[in-house]
Each structure stands twice: as structure tokens, then as C-alpha cells.
Image: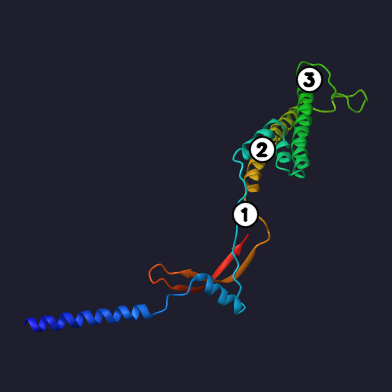
Amino acid sequence: MSKNLLFWGFFVFLLNFSFAQEDEIQPPPPEIDSLAQDLEGKGITIEEVTYEKKKINPLAPSKAAFYSAIFPGLGQIYNKRYWKAPLVWGAIGTGIYAYSFNNTEYNRARDAFKRRRVGLEDEFFDITGDGEGPDISLEALQDAQESTQRDRDLALLITIALYALNIIDANVDSHLKQYNVDDDLVIDFQPYLDLNPLTNKPNYGLALVIKY
């Protein structure tokens, strides 16, 4: 029994020794740098992808919105979107003009309606100048008063909406400016090299690289 144990122990020792010799005889796996040189020698270039990190100002959107709230268009100028400022001024200016015009017409129709109700003449009583009136009835003055009031209120709502849109545009535009939205988008296929941490051998592959 002891002879058998001695035999099997000696056999296991020889087996381990042979495996150890085999491991010593095996060459070490090539490094990534040498492998990259071999690929470059075959005409395969490996490019290192680098990304430029832009500085982000977290207060810029708030500043742009604040400037546009103080004076419409100023936030667009702060964002260096100079072409937007005349559009903001034109839109809000048109809304203010429409409100002012309809408010003036409303007051004229209202004053004439009040004077007509108490039996006095007004500016719409004898428009033709022929001495016969009234040229515009009381019902027409009431309709004109209601329509101009409706148009005035609508112009006010549109102007307020444009003012709010001006602030939102400045804020959102300032947010988008801090992201890389360059049109120079590049899609390329490149060799993929990596060292497997388990087998200590390089892995070959093909990587899809997107630069933007």
C-alpha cells in the first residue's frame, strides 16, 4: 500500500513538474504597444480619440433670462444671438402698437356712446357734414366698443405671451450653447485592442468611433 502511495505521489510530482516546465517554455503574451506597432507596420493606423471638455457656466441661463426680463432682447444679445434681438423688438413692438391702437379706438367709441346716451352730439354724429344725423347709430357704437375692447385684450395677451417667450428663448438658448452641437460629425471604424485581465492576452476587434 505504501509503495502505491509512493508511486502515485511521485507520478503527481512529475506531472506538475512537466506542466511547470511547459509554462516556462511558453513565451509571454505580446504587449499592446508591440501589437500596435505590428498593425501600423501592416498599414493599419490606430488613432487616439480625444475629447475637448468645454467649460460650463451654470449661471449663464439664469443671467440670460434675467436680462430678457429686464429688457426684451437683451438676453439674446447676452447669448450673442444678435439677429434675434430685432425679431423680439419687432414682435413685442407690434403687440404694443396693436394694444395701443385698439385701446384708443375703444375709448373713442365708449366716449361717443356715453354722449349719445345723454342726448349730446359726438364725433361720429355727423361724419358727412351734411347737418343730418346721426350717421352712426347707437347700436353701431356699442358694437364698435365691444369689438375694439376684444381686440385690445387679445393684443395684450399676445404681447404678454411674446414677452414670456422672449425670456424662455434666452434661457433655453443659453443652455444649448453649452453643449457641443457642431455639425462636423465623423463616424469611423478603427481596430480595437484590449488586454484581457483573465488570460493576459490581447483581444482583437473593430470599434465604431463617433466624433462630434
Does dot 3 land on a helix, a strand or a loop? helix
Q: Quadrant of the rendered structure where residue 60 is? A: top right
Q: Compare marks 2 and 3 and give the one earlier in the sequence.
A: 2
Instruction: Tell me where residue 140 appears, x and y as whole percent.
Output: 77, 30
68 or 6: nearer the eye?
6
Q: Which residue is mark 1?
A: 52
Q: Is residue 203 above or below residue 175?
A: below
Q: Amino acid at mark 3?
A: Arg
* Earlier residue among tags 3 and 1: 1
Looking at the rendered structure, the secondary structure element under dot 1 is loop
Q: Which residue is mark 2?
A: 64
* Image label count: 3
**Horizontal side of residue 164 vs 141, given as left or right:** left
Q: Residue at x 60, y 57 (%)?
A: 51
Q: Amino acid at mark 2?
A: Ala
Q: CA distance from mark 1 to mark 2?
A: 25 Å
Badges 1 and 2: C-beta atoms under 8 Å apart?
Answer: no
Q: Is residue 139 left or right of residue 128?
A: left
Instruction: Work out how far the residue at label 2 is from the one at label 3, CA to CA, in angstroms.
Output: 52 Å
Query: Can you tell which mark lies on residue 77?
Result: none
Disc 2 to disc 3: CB gap under 8 Å? no
Q: Identify the element where label 2 is drawn.
A: helix
Q: Tell me the mark number nearer the camera, choosing from 2 and 3.
A: 2
**Separation of residues labelled 3 and 1 (CA atoms):** 75 Å
Residue 71 visible in the current orientation: yes
Which quadrant of the rendered structure holds the N terminus?
bottom left
Q: Nearer the viewer, mark 3 or mark 1?
A: 1
Amino acid type, mark 1: Glu
- Which residue reaches farthest left? 1
Residue 99 image point, x, y percent: 75, 31
Residue wearing tag 3: 116
Q: Residues within 10 Å of mark 3 (few under 14, many from 20)?
A: some
